[in-house]
Every structure is written in C-alpha cells, then in structure tokens.
Image (spheres, rainbow, N blue to C red):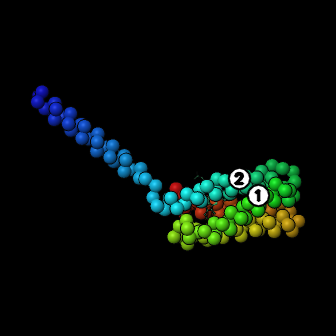
Amino acid sequence: MSRLRPVLLACAALAAVALAARQASAMPPPTPQKQKLAPVKALMEEKINPSVTTLSFHLYHSKNGDQLTPEVMDALVQLSETATGLVRNADKYTDDPAFRLYAIQLQTSVQGMIDAYGGQEDTAAISHWFTHVRSTCNSCHTTFRD
Ligand code: HEC
C-alpha cells in the first residue's frame, strides 16, 4: 500500500496541472479582433456614453426637455462627430460590414434629434429620435460586444 502512495500523489499532481491548463485555455488572450476594437471602447467611454447621459438627463429630468441649451448642443455635436468617425473608420475596427451600417444608423438617429431640436418641435419628436439612438447602441452591442 505504501508503495502506491507516491504514484497516487503523482497522479493527483498531474490532474492538478491538467486542470490548471484547462482553466488557462478557457480564458484566451485578447484576439486580434478585440485589439482592433480597443479604440472603439475608448470612444464609447469618453465620447458616446457621456453625451448620451447628458441628453437623457436633459430630456427626462428637466422641465425644458425641448430646449436646445448649450449643454445639449455640445452633447449633440459630440455624439454626431463620434458617430461620423465610427462610420469613416469602420474598416479599421472590423471586417464585418454590419459595423458601418450600425454606425450610420447612429448618425441618422442623432441627425433626427438635431432636426427635432432645431425645428422647434415638441419633446415627443426629440424623444422619438432618442429612442432610435438608444436602440442602435443595443443593435451594435449585440453583434460586436461580448
Ligand atoms: C457601431 C457599433 C456601436 C454602436 C452604434 C454603439 N456601440 Fe458602444 N460599443 C461598441 C463596441 C464594439 C464596444 C466594445 C469595445 C470593446 O470592448 O472592445 C462598445 C462598448 C461600449 C461601452 C463600454 C462598455 C464596456 O465596458 O464594454 C459603452 C459604455 C458603450 N459602448 C455605450 C454605447 C452607447 C450609449 C451607444 C449608443 C448611443 C453605443 N455604445 C453605440 C460598438 C458600438
């Protein structure tokens, strides 16, 4: 029995190594595709998300949701410029043409908001286009974010 012990210990050690290797392979290093999308993540965090937060706050938590305040103007400009950048640079981020289409949808929806504000339209028109803006976030994320 005692001669078996080292063998059993060796087996246990091997099993532990095999398990560690499996766990390591379950978490692969960033793929080249993920690296290509890294600048997109930065744009999302620094440009897209803050401007959407500003617009949302203004639209739903202030009394004058249809007023084109300087703050709203800045957020619309930032969102619009960033969306245009996503369209222009889509090829650098991925080979999948769907990315550019979603970026164009974002551009179009932001333009809808700009027109609704500029046309002295009611809050409903602005908020309609804002819904479109937000649905493009989800569409693109479903395909390109994990
Ligand atoms: C054209 C595609 C596309 C559109 C449209 C888009 N996103 Fe993204 N977004 C991405 C991708 C791709 C990532 C993930 C990048 C990565 O992690 O490598 C991302 C990541 C993010 C992140 C970072 C979260 C995280 O930690 O992964 C935020 C926040 C975000 N998006 C917000 C938004 C909002 C708000 C909108 C809508 C106004 C939006 N995005 C529209 C493609 C898009």
Badge 1 is on which residue? 75
User: Looking at the rendered structure, which numbered label has been put on residue 50?
Assistant: 2
Q: Nearer the viewer, residue 125 or 77?
A: 77
C-beta proximity under 8 Å, tags 2 and 1? yes
| Residue 21 visible to an observer of this rendering | yes
How crowded pointer 1 is (Cα within 10 Å; few <14, some 14-19, many 20+) is rated as: many
CB at disc 1 and ligand 1 closer than 8 Å: no
The residue at the point 85 percent across, 66 percent down is 118
The residue at the point 68 percent across, 57 percent down is 48
Q: Is residue 3 left or right of residue 115?
A: left
Q: CA distance from mark 2 to mark 1?
A: 8 Å
Residue type, label 1: Ala
Residue type, label 2: Pro
Q: Earlier in the sequence, mark 2 or mark 1?
A: 2
Residue 19, above or below 112:
above
Q: Is residue 98 left or right of residue 60?
A: left
Which secondary structure lies at badge 1? Answer: helix
Q: Quadrant of the N terminus?
A: top left
